[in-house]
Amino acid sequence: MSRGRIVGGSLFPWLLLTPGMLFLIAFLVAPGLLLAALSLRDVDGMLMVLPTYGFSQYIKVFTSAGYLDALGTTLWVAALTAVLCVLLAWPAAWLLVNTRSRAWRTVLYVILISPLLTSVVIRTFAWIVLLAQNGLINDVLRKLGVIDAPLALLWNMKAVIVAYVQVMLPFAVLPLATSLGEIPPALPRASQSLGAGARHTFFNVLLPLTIPGMMSGAIIVFALAAGSYVTPLLIGGRLQPLLPINIYQQALQIANLPLAAALSLTLLAVTAIIAAVMSRLQKQWERRVYGH
């Protein structure tokens, strides 16, 4: 009886995981394998997929200056977005954690996650309304006499980064708020009671303890920004040197599916490697701070 309970108890968690694992295998692992197989297919001069396999698509990716430049720009924009989101997330997370009123805290959380409840296309068109030459910002600046001619606020990388930050800021705030919430309230007071000033307490007590939350938020934002194509396509335009836009063009406009698959897997692999390195650094920091 005891052995039966042990075996049943050890199998029960796996039984609970079975539906989720089957879902991931069917809709993540299997499509990934099919995508990898497609990326190895050759194409003829008319971009028709041939029955032969090879590495011609990956050779084209890694020998093309345009694709390598797009990859580098994509990673740079994603990293800059992650840094800006983490910096802006600090005051927002601090306000969420230190708001005593439960009602106000609920209102702040609703405001924070409200962009996630709206379609990415609607959010993007809202930015177009704001940043266009006849948009709200240019209209207000002209009426105030600040500018004589409309500013070129749209169809550039700066507009893309601004839209990225607005959309992805909640993904940086929530992990940081969790880290701040786990810090005992008496800890900063104890630091100050021992003679440390507010600046010393922040940089030597609070900040080191929130590094894991900052890293978690940065990883999420980086991965999302690196793979996004709707926002840069609509706000930055199809000529922006970003790899997701190139993937979109190869897949839906040029119909070179093997090359689109190779570009997708290249971006996925590079993003996964960078995220794994950041996660490793996060774990090393946690061991250094917490000693485990």
Image (tube, rainbow, N blue to C red):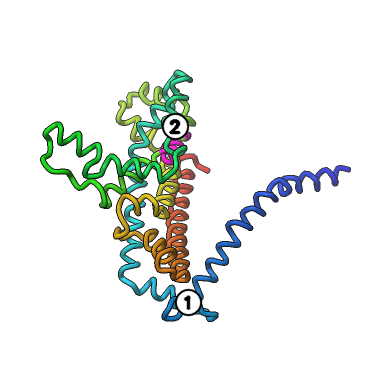
Query: Earlier along the polypeptide chain: callout 1 or callout 2?
Result: 1
Locate residue 31, reporting x and y percent: 57, 62
Q: Which residue is mark 2?
A: 180
Type of amino acid at the residue the image marks with label 1: Met
Residue 171: image quadrant is top left
Q: Are marks 1 and 2 in contact (CB under 8 Å)?
A: no
Closer to us: 34 or 202: 34
Looking at the image, residue 245 sits to the left or right of residue 109; the answer is left
Relative vertical location of residue 254 with respect to residue 123 in this rendering, above or below? below
Q: What kind of element bears circle 1?
A: loop
User: Looking at the image, which residue is at 47% across and 27% down?
Assistant: 184
User: Looking at the image, which residue is at 43% across and 52% down?
Assistant: 223
Based on the picture, tell me whether residue 215 belongs to the magenta stretch: no
User: Looking at the image, which residue is at 43% across and 21% down?
Assistant: 104
User: Looking at the image, which residue is at 20% across and 39% down?
Assistant: 138
Q: Which residue is mark 1?
A: 48
Which stretch is magenta? 170-178
Locate residue 47, reporting x and y percent: 44, 76
Type of amino acid at the residue the image marks with label 2: Leu
Residue 1: image quadrant is top right
Q: What kind of element bears circle 2?
A: helix
Relative vertical location of residue 92 with respect to residue 259 in this rendering, above or below? above
Locate residue 99, reporting x and y percent: 42, 22
Q: Disc 1 to disc 2, how far (Cα)?
A: 55 Å
Q: For the residues carrying marks 1 and 2, which lies nearer the camera in this image?
A: 1
